Image (tube, grey):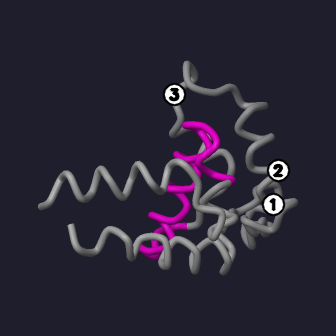
Amino acid sequence: MDYLKLLSSLKKDVIANPKFETIQYFRKDFISVWIWIYLLENHFNNKKKINIQNIIQEIPNEYASRPTIYKIIDIAVAKKYFIKKKDEKDKRKYNLFPSTQVVDEFKEWSKVFKDF
């Protein structure tokens, strides 16, 4: 692995990459990044449905409160970065899925790292 090349690419990307709207949104803070990665990871693994409660349970309390997590998710849903659907079995729960835009931008953005 060429660590210097990787670090150089990361540095350039961190400064600004306006090409990817959703990535810019989710990298604003640690919790947003974590939620973004968690949903994408589950999307690519075809794992179980993820609801807001799953996310809250995964994030240690010292990093974010429930209202903070809800706020991040609600804004992402309003921006259509996440899709929020009622659970088919338990109508009290809402499952979250990354939008097509989030998945497509992640795939395109991650191409930068293929040569490392």
Graded by Cα atoms within 10 Å as few (under 14), some (14 to 19) or many (20 or more), the crowding at tag 2 reads some
Residue in the picture at 55% in, 19% down? 62
Q: Amino acid at mark 1?
A: Val
Asked whether 28 falls inside the magenta stretch, the response is yes
Q: Nearer the viewer, residue 34 or 104?
A: 104
Residue named by callout 3: 60
- Classify 20 as above or below 61: below
Q: Residue furthest left?
A: 1
Instruction: State the CA–CA distance, disc 1 to disc 2.
Output: 5 Å
Q: Amino acid at mark 3?
A: Pro
Q: Are marks 3 and 2 in contact (CB under 8 Å)?
A: no
Residue named by callout 1: 77
Q: Amino acid at mark 2?
A: Asp
Please indicate whether residue 99 sits to the left or right of residue 74 in the image: left
Instruction: State the CA–CA distance, disc 3 to disc 2.
Output: 19 Å
Please indicate whether residue 42 sits to the left or right of residue 83 in the image: left
Instruction: State the CA–CA distance, disc 3 to disc 1.
Output: 22 Å
Secondary structure beneath dot 3 equals loop
State the mark number for residue 74.
Answer: 2
Task: Assign the N terminus to one quadrant of the image.
Answer: bottom left
Q: Are marks 1 and 2 in contact (CB under 8 Å)?
A: yes
Secondary structure beneath dot 2 equals helix
Q: Which residues are magenta?
A: 25-48
Asked whether 68 falls inside the magenta stretch, the response is no
- Classify 110 as above or below 58: below
Q: Quadrant of residue 84?
A: bottom right
Q: Nearer the viewer, residue 99 or 13?
A: 13
x, y (%) of residue 47?
Answer: 46, 70
Secondary structure beneath dot 1 equals helix
Residue in the picture at 49% in, 78% down? 108
Q: Quadrant of residue 70?
A: top right
